[in-house]
Image: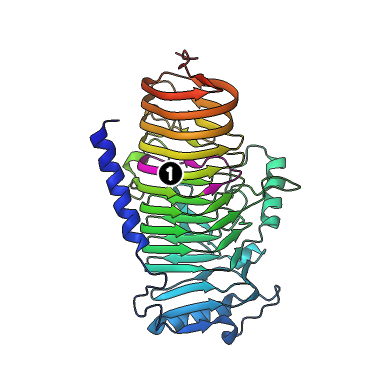
Amino acid sequence: MGCERFDLMFSQILRTSLMFSTLGFFSLCAADEVTAKRFVISDYGAVADAKTINTQAIQKAIDEASVGGGVVVIPKGIFRSGSIFLKNGVALTLDEGAVLLGSNRIEDYPKRVTRIEGHFEPWRMALVNAQQMDHVRIGGKGKIDGNGILFWAAFWQRRKENPRCTNLEVERPRLMFIDCCQDVRVEGLALQDSGFWNLHLYRCDGVVIEGLRINAPTSGHILGPSTDGIDIDSSRNVTVRKCFIAVNDDNIALKGSKGPFADKDIDSPPVENILVEDCEFGDGNGVITCGSEATIVRHVLVRNCTVAGRTNLLTLKLRPDTPQHYSDIVIEGIKLTGTGRVFQVAPWTQFFDLKGQPAPSRTVEAITIKNVSGDYRTLGSLRGNPGDTIRDITLENITLKLDDEKLALGVVTNVVLKNVLVNNKPYAWPVPSEK
């Protein structure tokens, strides 16, 4: 990547980070942090017994707060609920010791046409929903618990019956869905045991996600399927900062559409200007994953993070049925003590469908990984489908101790190595393993 091109990308992302870091947490349309009226859900009949379904009481507090603006407060205690829907002028905060516990009855999550896996269909809404809002504020020192174990069990049972079942065959609610919103801040919370994705952003602009702790089971008796940490879907100008993410799927997924007509999908604009910094990653499928549905992803900067679990540093899923362009991705300042792959760039054929169309091609370009050190399992894979273009790959100031030095390599052009040491030896770029 040319220096001029990198400097432009970096300055765009840095401006976004600085701009949104100055926003106050309770900056509401009608009230500020000092004067905002508090609407405590227990005053509206919510009961903290971990059993009562409090959906109506919580929604009543939100509805009343929306009249003049204010903060809906979940106090200390365990409050069970189905889907709630925020409104303009209303912030949601969870006090220390507060738990918003998701119902484990799927009927408590209404089915509506919603964005899911790169398209729209009737699907269950999330536990917490914000749609077509400005100035979204969700945070506090409490916890949102998806109570997902029954949903996971239902999915694994279906997968046992039909190993080729899709992710959407068994209805499971997301933990949080923020849809077509601007100026969004989600801060401080613990997100746990989501039935499906944890935090899904769709067509949002100007987002700061800070200080979250996101967990789903990655070992033990039952795993949490499709429990992505953060899904950034067709959104731009997003900062993820000081978060911990350990889940049983993608840590941070950058998503769009899929299929042979994906590049013509007006509902799936590019994912762009993404900054991830000062985060810690445990288990997962990729610190950054592009796919399973994605078209254009560009201008992504990941910096000053640690990886201490079974996850890949960069996963790029190359769907043979989808035109894709992944570009200008920089990963720098990373400490590794995990057991994943540096690269997992490879064809992704799960449920692909050309719909009778000729196979499109994909381009991966301008990928830079630099200032990375530590212990990891392997370099992984860097290859595409026939006809794909992978070019302009830079590895700089890399010092790694690896269990396996092999790199499954396809056709890659313009590779730059600068001060790359693997197992105390200068690294030599391997001969491609495929033509």
Q: Relative to 403, does residue 303 appear above or below in the rendering?
A: below
Q: Quadrant of residue 297?
A: top left
Is residue 222 magenta-colored? no
Please give the range of residues in magenta.
Answer: 280-301
Asked if residue 132 shows in the view, the reply is yes
- Residue at 41% across, 59% down: 208
**Left or right: 316 with respect to 18?**
right
Query: Mark 1 — residue?
Result: 303
Is residue 281 magenta-colored? yes
Asked if residue 292 shows in the view, the reply is no
x then y, percent, for residue 26? 41, 73
The amino acid on which the numbered mark 1 sits, given as a three-letter code, is: Arg
Q: Quadrant of residue 374?
A: top right
Circle 1 SS class = strand
Q: Relative to 432, does residue 253 appear above or below in the rendering?
A: below
In the orientation shown, which residue stands out farthest toward the bottom?
Answer: 43
Q: Quadrant of residue 24?
A: bottom left
Tell me the quarter of the image containing the C terminus.
Answer: top left
| Numbered marks: total | 1
In the orientation shown, which residue stands out farthest toward the front?
Answer: 424
x then y, percent, for residue 250? 54, 44
Q: Nearer the viewer, residue 91 or 265?
A: 91
- Residue at 63% across, 52% down: 216
x then y, percent, for residue 235? 37, 52
- Residue at 57% across, 27% down: 401
For disc 1, the neighbor class at 10 Å (few under 14, some 14 to 19, many from 20) is many
In the orientation shown, which residue stands out farthest toward the left?
Answer: 4
